[in-house]
Image (cartoon, grey):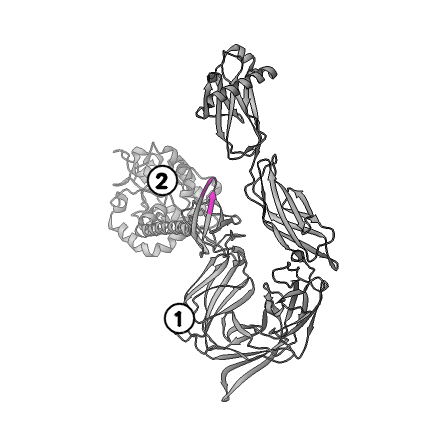
């Protein structure tokens, strides 16, 4: 049956397509809306074409090819597809052909057909929570009724849900309105007071329809009046704990009776206190609030509705009515506390006394009476200090006075709060003479945007209560906890990134213990600055000592966990990390004579901040290195100098002979005292009997000075010379037989004038009876000098005389007549044929005796043993 029906349907469709369409493909069905979430089946049929079969067809949904497993082949020319509609957006479903025949490719538009799917949701549930209200206008009830309800489920733009609000009275007269929203109004003309009304809502779209529940109530059940007006509050001094409220009815009693509700609160509070409903259920126009706090500002409100049970809706709250209750003497004690300021000094510990108003101040506190009793004995009496302090408030805290608390002495503080009516009880706080133990293992952590304080009870069980104090950014506050508490949250307002010093004290019958304190942050952040690094002293050869100051707590914004020190030279950067409590670090292994750039990064758990850069240059030499070099060189020089001095001391004779040779003075010769066997004035020998004469020239000034020096030593040497000369005969003198070297034979050459400036140069002249065996023609005449002066090289070494000729000619240059005395000039003329060397003599300074001594140096001397002719 199904196959026959399908064949009939296909035949009908084929005829229809052939009659009204030129396409070779036909799709069906074409519904107006498709329900989202349902399964949809579409069929595609081939019309009058044999080159295309059902196997060549495929389905495309929103440009997505549907999987083949969703297809169903009806026959060789028809195919269907079934899929679940999931999207609520409208979309196209196309049947296409993939046969590659040229005819099909060229006529692609004839081989495609589609279905436009519009989506919608079925109405899933009836409108719920239907509520209606008729508002009061002026002194009567409005004829328009307003209703609200909950929607009936999701909908699309193509098929929205249409809501129809129906209102029908007992006369079966109906009024309605339609909308796509969940709120509507229906106008009834004159409001039907005391009549029953039926109200319901109908929800409908293309895929279905539902109705809400029907409300059947008396018309006044839907009425909402205005709130009471002209609220007034009366304060009576005789009743400081009560206020009287009065108001005016919002609507005439002919409509219905009203019931009321009243609430009140203190100024600044966040909660309201409601008056019990049974006290205000009657038809009243005034009410007295009781059990209020004296001297407190209260805010009151009133509301009303139909007094019939279950009828009507509460009106809005009236405007605020504000009034102060009359004042009364304060009840309770002020919250007295004192916080430590700074560090202890010579006078003790400075403290700041502060307080909070009593919980029941019963009015405005105008002043405090403060009494301080310090137990320091003076003349066997106790000194008291009693002052009255005016209020100086910071929020709800009153700062009273700063006082010093002496060490090792107990102090008692008493405080009384005073208002315009009376004063409170005395509050007591004491500081014992000796510190008492406080809590142990204090820990503070951030939890849920608050600071959690935990501690362990002290060993002593005598605990009355605990005081938790916190100080941060110049503000101080505290709260008190009972004696069994070991953990609590700080209730006061705290700020993030602010360092708070949290302290816990133990109170024992009003006597305070020492504080146990820790620092904490409600929330940590990255520092807002970093310290500036500087050098301690001057940089060294391979190191530098860096110092910096700790970041102030208000700028650290958290606990500094580490400092990272960076130092850079050229392209090389190194880093060193130190703990957050460090304030200095010594860099080592630096290069000498090198410039470094250094900076510090301060880090918390939330981030870090880089400080400014500081540059320094290391020393070229290490400390003491220059001093060591100087000391080493100085010690070396001193050692060398000492060695030279010691060498000079031990070799002084050698040095003296080389630098200052001892040259005998011819003027000290004893020839002048020697008497030959015949007169010295005998006839001079002839030229033929003189074998050789040498002439020395002596500097006049040097000769004079030399003669003067030799004269001084002459008396000491004279006897010795005489003894030596007389011990040997003529020609047998020991001093003449041994040749000696003269300083005049120095090889200095052109410097002869300098080296012989203080020497006396002379030669011996020997006259013999014959030269090499020759017999003289006349008796031999000789003279012998007794001088100790060694012979000249020309006398001692005749073989080398030829080599020394050039120097000899320089030493034996003949002086001019201008440099000789008259006697010397005469002698030179007499001896010139014999080639004698004349001894120059200063005519102006030499005495005749000196002339005689000088002349004796050039005497005739025979050639004896030990003498050789020049």
Query: How far apart are the alpha carbons under marks 1 and 2?
Result: 112 Å
Q: Earlier in the sequence, mark 1 or mark 2?
A: 1
Q: Which residues are magenta?
A: 566-573
Instruction: Inspect the magenta stretch and tell me whether residue 576 lies in it.
Output: no
Residue 461, x across and y down, in percent: 39, 74
Q: Which residue is mark 2?
A: 746
Question: Considering the image in quadrants, where does the C terminus appear?
Answer: top left
Residue 632, x across and y down, in percent: 37, 50
Foreground label between 1 and 2? 1
Residue 66 vs 814, above or below: the answer is above
Q: Is residue 763 left or right of residue 411?
A: left
Q: Residue at x 47, y 57 (%)?
A: 447
Q: Residue furthest bottom?
A: 380
Q: Is residue 661 left or right of residue 572?
A: left
The disc placed on residue 458 is: 1
Residue 314 vs 680, above or below: the answer is below
Residue 359: image quadrant is bottom right
Q: Secondary structure at mark 2?
A: loop
User: Is residue 675 in view?
Assistant: no
Residue 268, x across and y down, in percent: 62, 65
Q: Secondary structure at mark 1?
A: loop
Q: Residue at x 46, y 72 (%)?
A: 465
Label 1 CA crowd tier, 10 Å (few <14, some 14–19, many 20+): some
Nearer to us in this view, 553 or 841: 553
Look at the magenta stretch and give its main secondary structure: strand
Q: Residue furthest front?
A: 171
Instruction: Inspect the magenta stretch and tell me whether residue 568 lies in it.
Output: yes
The disc placed on residue 310 is: none
Nearer to us in this view, 19 or 25: 19
Nearer to us in this view, 502 or 676: 502
Nearer to us in this view, 754 or 681: 754
């Amino acid at each position: 049956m199904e196959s026959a029906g399908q064949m009939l349907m296909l035949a009908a469709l084929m005829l229809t397509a052939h009659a009204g369409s030129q396409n070779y493909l036909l799709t069906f069905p074409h519904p107006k809306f498709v329900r989202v979430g349902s399964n949809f089946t579409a069929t595609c049929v081939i019309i009058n074409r044999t080159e295309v079969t059902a196997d060549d067809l495929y389905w495309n949904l929103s440009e997505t090819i549907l999987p083949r497993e969703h297809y169903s082949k009806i026959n060789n020319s028809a195919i269907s597809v079934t899929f679940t509609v999931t999207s609520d957006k409208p979309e196209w479903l196309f049947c296409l052909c993939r046969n590659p025949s040229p005819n099909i490719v060229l006529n692609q538009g004839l081989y495609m057909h589609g279905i436009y799917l519009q989506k919608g949701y079925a109405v899933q549930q009836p409108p719920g929570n239907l509520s209606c209200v008729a508002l009061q206008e002026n002194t009567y009830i409005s004829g328009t009724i307003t209703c609200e309800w909950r929607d009936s489920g999701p909908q699309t733009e193509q098929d929205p849900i249409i809501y129809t609000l129906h209102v029908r009275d007992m006369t079966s007269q109906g009024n309605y309105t339609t909308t796509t929203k969940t709120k509507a109004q229906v106008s009834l003309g004159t409001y039907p007071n005391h009549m029953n009304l039926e109200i319901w809502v109908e929800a409908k779209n293309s895929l279905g329809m539902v109705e809400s529940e029907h409300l059947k109530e008396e018309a006044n059940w839907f009425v909402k009046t205005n709130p009471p007006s002209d609220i007034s509050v009366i304060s009576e001094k005789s009743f400081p704990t009560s206020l009287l409220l009065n108001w005016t009815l919002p609507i005439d009693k002919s409509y219905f009776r009203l019931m009321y509700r009243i609430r009140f609160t203190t100024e600044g509070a966040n909660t309201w206190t409601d008056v019990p409903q049974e006290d205000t259920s009657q038809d009243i126009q005034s009410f007295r609030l009781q059990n209020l706090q004296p001297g407190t500002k209260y805010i009151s409100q009133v509301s009303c509705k139909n007094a019939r049970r279950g009828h009507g809706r509460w009106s809005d709250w009236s405007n605020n009515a504000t009034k102060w209750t009359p004042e009364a003497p304060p009840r309770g004690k002020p919250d007295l506390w004192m916080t430590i300021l700074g560090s202890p000094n010579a006078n003790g510990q400075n403290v700041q006394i502060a307080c909070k108003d009593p919980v029941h101040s019963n009015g405005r506190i105008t002043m405090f009476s403060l009494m301080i009793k310090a137990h320091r004995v003076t003349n066997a009496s106790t000194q008291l200090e009693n002052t009255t302090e005016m209020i100086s408030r910071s929020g709800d805290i009153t700062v009273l006075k700063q006082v010093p608390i002496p060490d090792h002495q107990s102090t008692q503080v008493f405080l009384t709060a005073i208002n315009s009516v009376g004063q409170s009880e005395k509050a007591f706080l004491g500081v014992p003479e000796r510190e008492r133990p406080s809590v142990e293992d204090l820990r503070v952590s951030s939890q849920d945007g608050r600071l959690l304080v935990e501690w362990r009870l002290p060993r002593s069980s005598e605990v009355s209560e605990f005081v938790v104090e916190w100080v941060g950014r110049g503000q101080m506050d505290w709260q008190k906890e009972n004696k069994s508490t070991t953990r609590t949250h700080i209730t006061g307002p705290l700020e993030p990134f602010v360092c708070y010093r949290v302290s816990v004290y133990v109170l024992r019958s009003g006597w305070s213990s020492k504080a146990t304190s820790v620092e904490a942050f409600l929330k940590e952040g990255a520092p807002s600055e970093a310290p500036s690094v500087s050098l301690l002293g001057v940089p060294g050869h391979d190191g530098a000592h860096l110092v910096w100051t700790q970041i102030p707590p208000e700028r650290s914004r958290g606990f500094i966990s580490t400092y990272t020190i960076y130092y850079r030279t050229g392209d090389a950067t190194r880093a060193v990390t130190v703990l957050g409590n460090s304030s200095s670090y010594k860099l080592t292994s630096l290069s000498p004579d090198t410039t470094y750039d250094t900076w510090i990064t301060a880090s918390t758990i939330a981030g870090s901040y880089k400080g400014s850069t500081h540059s320094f240059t290391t020393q070229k030499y290490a400390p003491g290195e220059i001093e060591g070099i100087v000391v080493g060189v100085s010690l070396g020089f001193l050692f060398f100098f000492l060695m030279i001095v010691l060498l000079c001391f031990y070799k002084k004779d050698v040095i003296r002979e080389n630098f200052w040779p001892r040259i005998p003075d011819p003027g000290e010769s004893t020839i002048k005292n020697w008497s030959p066997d015949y007169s010295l004035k005998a006839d001079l020998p002839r030229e033929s009997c003189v074998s050789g004469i040498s002439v020395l020239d002596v500097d006049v000034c040097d000769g004079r000075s030399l003669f003067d020096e030799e004269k001084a030593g002459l008396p000491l040497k004279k006897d010795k010379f005489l003894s030596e000369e007389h011990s040997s005969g003529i020609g047998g003198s020991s001093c003449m037989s041994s040749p000696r070297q003269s300083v005049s034979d120095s090889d200095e050459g052109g410097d002869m004038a300098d080296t012989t400036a203080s020497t006396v140069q002379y030669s011996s002249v020997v006259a013999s009876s014959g030269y090499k065996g020759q017999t003289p023609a006349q008796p031999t005449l000789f003279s012998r000098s007794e001088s100790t002066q060694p012979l000249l090289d020309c006398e001692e070494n005749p073989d080398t005389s030829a080599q020394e000729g050039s120097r000899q000619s320089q030493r034996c240059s003949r002086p001019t007549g201008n440099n000789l005395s008259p006697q010397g000039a005469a002698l030179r003329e007499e001896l010139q044929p014999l080639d004698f060397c004349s001894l120059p003599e200063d005519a102006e300074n030499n005495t005749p005796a000196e002339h005689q001594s000088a002349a004796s140096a050039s005497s005739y001397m025979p050639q004896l043993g030990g003498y050789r002719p020049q």
